[in-house]
Amino acid sequence: MRSEPDWERLKQTLCAGQTDVLLLDLDSESSDADQHVKVFEEINAVGVAVVILTDDGTRPAALDLVTRGAHSYCRKPPALRELKAIIRRAGEHVAMKRELEERRGNGFPSSEGVELLRCGGLIGSSAEMRTVYDLIHRVASLNASVLITGESGTGKELIARAIHTSGDRWKAPFIAVSCGAIPETLIESELFGHEKGAFTGTNGTRIGYFEQAENGTILIDEIGELSLQTQVKLLRVLQQREFSRLGSGRAIPLNARVIFATHRNLSRMVAEGTFRLDLFYRINVMSIEAPPLWRHPDDIPALAEFFVRQYSEIFQKRITGITPAALALLQGYEWPGNVRELENAIQSAIVCADTEVIQSSDLPERLQEANLVDDADVPQIGSFEQLLRDFKVKLATKAIQDCNGNKTLAARSLDISRAYLHRLIRSREEPEMADSVEETRPSAAGSSWPCENRPTKLAQNKSSDALPKPVRATFVREPSREEFTIARSWAEEPPMPSSDADPGARMLNARKRGAAG
């Protein structure tokens, strides 16, 4: 890493191909936006990834450069961990871009295209996906049972299809059955078939899914949704390798290969008694896990490009690509719905796009809100008290937004008083006020002061000239629960009787206590 303040020498270094990532520090004292754009366009033409360093004054200019092709931006002063992560992602992006250009120039398809052809629709070149590809090729030509696990939307059915198309059965039928979509009363009839008159309402013979698969492959999806009774019957079919239609005694051989898939934890279901242990061992000969999308974010650009081409054709709307800023949003999102959610986001962006390139504003709001939250959570330099105060204010502001502006509900959700919430909100405009704002709440015994904050007699007997600044306290009135705030000093409290008081007064007080008892 090197620093180069001279513009001419910088251009020579970039043209020599000795740089992959460039940190461009925008001058906050310069307000010439055209000059910023001119410098960036000259740098971007070389093909390096540009990361913008900006402060609050130049943030609009940084956002404009990101829309023009800059990789990303980072706020000044940058957090070291965040800056390292941004530089690493930018370097990987440049390396992948150069490798793709070299492969296209040599006239042969990229590795992603080869994997797509051999794995029946799976896209990705990350280490996680390559592990999946390796397992697919290992079991493709074997007649062993395979259990595919993974979260919803990770492509478990695509893995099953890849196993089918990569093996010797690729010419035979592939049948996918979702157990969760079939009523429990009809699951046996759907799987094994039935004869005419087997039960009420049957008007003819039905061929079940096992019989339809012939010598091909049948995928039993959501195997964890089957009842214990159906699990027993399925176990017998797998053990005997034959089945019979309902209402018939003729045994039909099971020639199809059976693959199972589920998003549930079958081991936990076995421990809970909702899934048979013997069936679990029968189907779990070989296990393949479909990785969630957050574990291989490097595959998001290839997936997004595939969905853009697919749905721009289906929707008959010309979309040529995605801007780097929008792609950064896609890679920074956690994707709880995995590839299915990414597919939905690209469909929505194509519909909302006003140009031929998908912008950040075209993406769903949940992606943009997640980016704002991540940007706000970047730690800034400052004292511990200042960071703690800012965090409290952010929590209070977020709670008010979640409660649609109702401060009473917001205070209850944070388990603080409404008055304390008001002081936190006011501290945004008066930062010096927040340093002395601390909440005091009533104790269980009904006292206005908690035990750790209760003033001692020694503090009450101090003279008023040695007192600190007025103390702010919050009191709660029972049973109406109305809360109010006062400011008072300990000097306003009446002095406690000392031990050298008048003996007659002490005797009178003792008599009063005896009468009260």
Image (cartoon, rainbow, N blue to C red):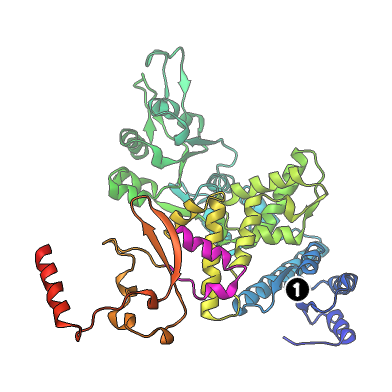
Q: Position of residue 99 (x, y in %)?
A: 75, 68
Q: Is residue 206 magenta?
A: no
Q: Position of residue 261 (x, y in %)?
A: 46, 45
**Relative side of 215 to 447, left or right:** right
Q: Residues within 10 Å of mark 1 (few under 14, many from 20)?
A: many
Quarter placement of the N terminus: bottom right
Q: Nearer the viewer, residue 40 or 33?
A: 33
Q: Residue lying furthest front in this view?
A: 504
Q: In the rendered structure, which segment of residues is drawn in magenta?
A: 417-439
In the rendered image, the vertical position of residue 46 relative to residue 503, given as above or below: above
Instruction: Determine if residue 234 is in view.
Output: yes
**Relative side of 250 to 109, left or right:** left
Q: Quadrant of residue 376?
A: bottom right
Instruction: Determine if residue 517 is in view.
Output: no
Report the label total.
Answer: 1
Q: Position of residue 143 (x, y in %)?
A: 46, 46
**Relative side of 298 to 477, left or right:** right
Question: What amino acid does circle 1 point to?
Answer: Ile
What residue is drawn where x is 38% and y is 25%?
185
Q: Position of residue 509 (x, y in %)?
A: 15, 73
Q: Nearer the viewer, residue 79 or 137?
A: 79
Q: Is residue 434 magenta?
A: yes
Q: Quadrant of residue 82?
A: bottom right
Quarter placement of the C terminus: bottom left
What residue is drawn where x is 73% and y is 53%?
361
Circle 1: element type:
strand
Q: Which residue is mark 1?
A: 52
